[in-house]
Amino acid sequence: MVIAIDIGGTFIKIGLVNNGEIITKISIKANSIQSFETTISEIESAVELLFVESHIKKSEIKGIGIGFPGLIDSLRMKVLSTNKKYDDAVKFDFIKWGKETYNVPLFLENDARVALLGEWQFGAGKGIDNIVMLTFGTGVGSATLLDGKLLIGKHFQAGNLGGHFTVNVNGAQCTCGNLGCVEAEASTWKLAELLKSDSRYADSLIEGEELDFKSLFKFAAEGGALSLAVRDQCLEVWAAGVINQIHAYDPGLVILGGGVMKSADVIMPFIQNKVNKHAWTPWGKVKIKQSRIPNRSALLGAYYLVTNNLKK
């Protein structure tokens, strides 16, 4: 039995997983600007609730797997760098917490990598050993699997910065310090600015609505000129981001995930068509797939992270 934790910017998902099956799970609201110690206390309370509801004992737990939104030293289980989320987690001793609280080993990894592990072992990537995964949501996350191994790199950031590949050399300032990143050109945190900075906004269908991708795709489908223009701009940026990943890592499969994939019926054919036209892959076409287990991939990936490491 494994405690699997997916720490997100909006929600934190926690599950008890055994033999690749999520026995029980809970989702709690996240506050990524509060003290990380407070967040950990909230996680402990949620885990305790899962124990009570499932009649599972703490003694049955063999390990803890955590996906965290930042750059992670997966050898020392430390957060190296964050981007405006849980900034004080860089000082937190995860190994000590796992030992003192549950008396088990703890394994920490970047959240996108953990989600990729879940899709590789249990979802859309099953049976394929060269995969890039991109997640489009508040920001843009990425992870890469090469020959059945997570791409890590010398400083633990290889494959993780797909959202910060430059797609516009004269583009917007990103929170990372770069200009024209995929994330700075087309992500949830950028969307309101993209819409409000357009002179058509005041008279648009989306004016006064929640400025998220759900609304954007809805009003684009209804023929709203501004929504349609911004939607298509975002699609172009995401397609360019995918093509960059293909050129960088030579995957056999690209998996797309994140909240924006609720509009997969529009996104998937657009990106697949752009990849077919513009990616330099003389051997054939790269298949683009939607995440098959979007609500479970991170928890199952955290489970695999633990069980795979315990075998070593």
Image: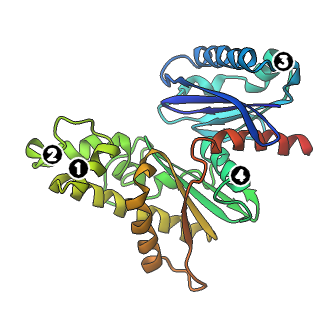
* Tag 3–tag 2 contact (CB < 8 Å): no
The answer to whether 175 is drawn above or below residue 238 in the figure is above
Real-space Cα distance between discs 4 and 1? 35 Å
Q: Which residue is mark 2?
A: 205
Q: How is the image coloured?
A: rainbow
Can residue 127 be seen? yes
Quarter holding the N terminus is top right
Can residue 73 be seen? no
Q: Position of residue 29 (x, y in %)?
A: 51, 23
Real-space Cα distance between discs 3 and 4? 26 Å
- Residue type, mark 2 in image: Leu
Q: Position of residue 202 (x, y in %)?
A: 9, 41
The crowding category of the residue bearing disc 2, from other C-alpha atoms within 10 Å (few below 14, some 14 to 19, many at least 20), is many
- Label number found at residue 122: 4
Q: Position of residue 169 (x, y in %)?
A: 35, 61
- Residue type, mark 1 in image: Phe
The crowding category of the residue bearing disc 4, from other C-alpha atoms within 10 Å (few below 14, some 14 to 19, many at least 20), is some
Whichever of callouts 3 and 4 sits on the residue coming sooner in the sequence is 3
- Left or right for 45, reference 310: left
Q: Which residue is mark 3?
A: 57
Label 3: state its secondary structure: loop
Whichever of callouts 1 and 2 sits on the residue coming sooner in the sequence is 2
* Tag 1–tag 2 contact (CB < 8 Å): yes
The image quadrant of residue 13 is top right
The image quadrant of residue 16 is top right
Label 1: state its secondary structure: helix
- Left or right for 99, reference 93: right
Q: Residue at 52% of width from left, 29% of height from top? A: 11
